[in-house]
Image (spheres, rainbow, N blue to C red):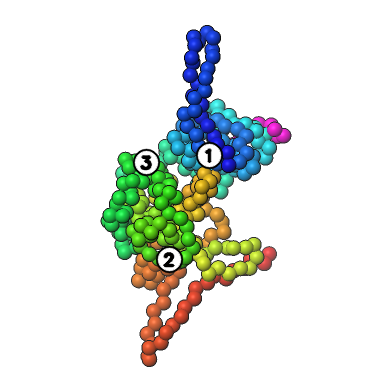
């Protein structure tokens, strides 16, 4: 990881002599390890990284990666913005137009996200509901959402600030827990499910609709079994719809990893559940819930697992 520094040049003698001194005004980590170009599009910084073969769109206010796209150039060296189009230079292949190379992500421009007032009522009615897992009226959640969101009004930045807040306040522990959002946040660690409960609770407390997603995870290229599963969140951004956010996956020091899990979904996740909360049939599990009546009283042990193998061609 290397540091990226912005310089502000200050004239110290008459302009006809044109002598300057550099004063560092801001420093943050670059998202890659081999930065080969930088440009500014009027709103965001763009960095090219040869090692990861990515172009990173960066918020200059805090250094957070807004999104990443795959570079169309393999040996890229330099970026330029001409007012309409982002250009990526390849030292072996010439100049390549890169604006349309979006990779496998949801391309979100924060400035183009609609206002909170534009969220449909039918979405709010379902996905702002409070319940026993989220408990967003609890003081722990109410104080946290004020600290995380502040006066922010843009739905994208509300979702992103809550995402960043969990990185600062929690650490991941794969313990398979199912505790409530206030309990998990006060404790400071949790499983992917518990991260999701906290993230949804904070989003809903801020007025931003959110729901959880459960999935089977393909853990290899060949036949495999999964009995761990994975859970993340979807937030509703007006003008874009439901956008995936994985708060436990993004809890990492690397700006690249943080951006990777906000608005991006790998194709190894096979979604089994999308829900705003519990239900009589599924409670809070990923797939199903079973009910038994036995006589005499019997202890029933149940295991859930997913088994898959590639289709034969």
Viewer-side residue, 175 vs 203: 175
Q: Earlier in the sequence, mark 3 or mark 1?
A: 1
Between the residue at mark 2 and the residue at mark 1, the CA separation in whole angstroms equals 33 Å
Which residue is located at x 64 percent, y 42 percent? 51
Q: Is residue 5 magenta?
A: no
- In what quadrant of the picture does the C terminus appear? bottom right
Q: Is residue 295 above or below residue 287?
A: below
Q: Which residue is mark 2?
A: 177
Which comes sooner in the sequence, label 3 or label 2? 3
The x and y percentages for residue 162 are: 39, 48
Task: Look at the image and tell me whether residue 27 can be seen.
Answer: yes
* Classed neighbour count for the residue bearing mark 3: other residues with Cα under 10 Å, few (<14), some (14–19), many (≥20): some
Residue 1, quarter of the rendered image? top right
Q: Residue furthest bottom?
A: 296
The mark nearer the N terminus, 2 or 1, is 1
Residue at 31%, 44% in the rendered image: 117
Q: Which residue is label 3 attached to?
A: 154
Secondary structure, mark 3, is: loop
Q: Which span is picked out in magenta? A: 91-98
Residue 29 is labelled as 1
Q: Position of residue 178 (x, y in %)?
A: 40, 66
**Residue 221 higher or lower than 50, as above or below:** below
Mark 1 secondary-structure assignment: strand
């Amino acid at each position: 990881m290397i540091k990226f520094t912005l310089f502000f040049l200050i004239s110290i003698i008459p302009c006809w002599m044109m002598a300057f001194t550099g004063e560092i005004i801001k420093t943050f980590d670059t998202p890659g390890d081999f930065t080969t170009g930088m440009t500014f599009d009027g709103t965001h910084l763009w960095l090219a990284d040869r090692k990861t073969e990515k172009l990173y769109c960066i918020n200059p206010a805090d250094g957070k990666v807004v999104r990443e796209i795959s570079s169309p150039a393999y040996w890229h060296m330099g970026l330029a913005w001409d007012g309409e189009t982002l250009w990526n230079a390849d030292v072996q292949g010439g100049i390549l137009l890169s604006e349309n190379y979006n990779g496998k992500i949801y391309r979100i421009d924060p400035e183009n996200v609609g206002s909170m007032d534009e969220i449909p009522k039918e979405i709010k009615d379902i996905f702002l509901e409070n319940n026993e897992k989220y408990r967003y009226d609890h003081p722990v959640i109410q104080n946290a959402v004020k600290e995380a969101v502040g006066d922010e009004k843009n739905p994208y930045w509300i979702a992103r600030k809550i995402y960043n807040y969990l990185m600062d306040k929690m650490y991941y522990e794969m313990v398979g827990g199912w505790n409530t959002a206030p309990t998990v946040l006060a404790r400071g660690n949790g499983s992917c499910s518990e991260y999701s409960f906290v993230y949804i609770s904070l989003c809903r407390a801020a007025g931003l609709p959110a729901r959880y997603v459960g999935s089977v995870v393909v853990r290899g290229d060949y036949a495999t079994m999964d009995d761990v599963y994975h859970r993340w969140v979807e937030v509703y951004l007006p003008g874009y719809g439901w956008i995936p956010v994985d708060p436990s996956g993004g809890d990492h020091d690397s700006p690249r990893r943080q951006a990777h899990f906000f608005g991006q979904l790998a194709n190894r996740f096979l979604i089994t559940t999308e829900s705003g909360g519990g239900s009589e049939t599924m409670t809070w599990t990923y797939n199903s819930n079973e009910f038994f009546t036995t006589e005499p009283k019997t202890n029933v042990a149940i295991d859930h697992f997913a088994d898959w193998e590639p289709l034969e061609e």
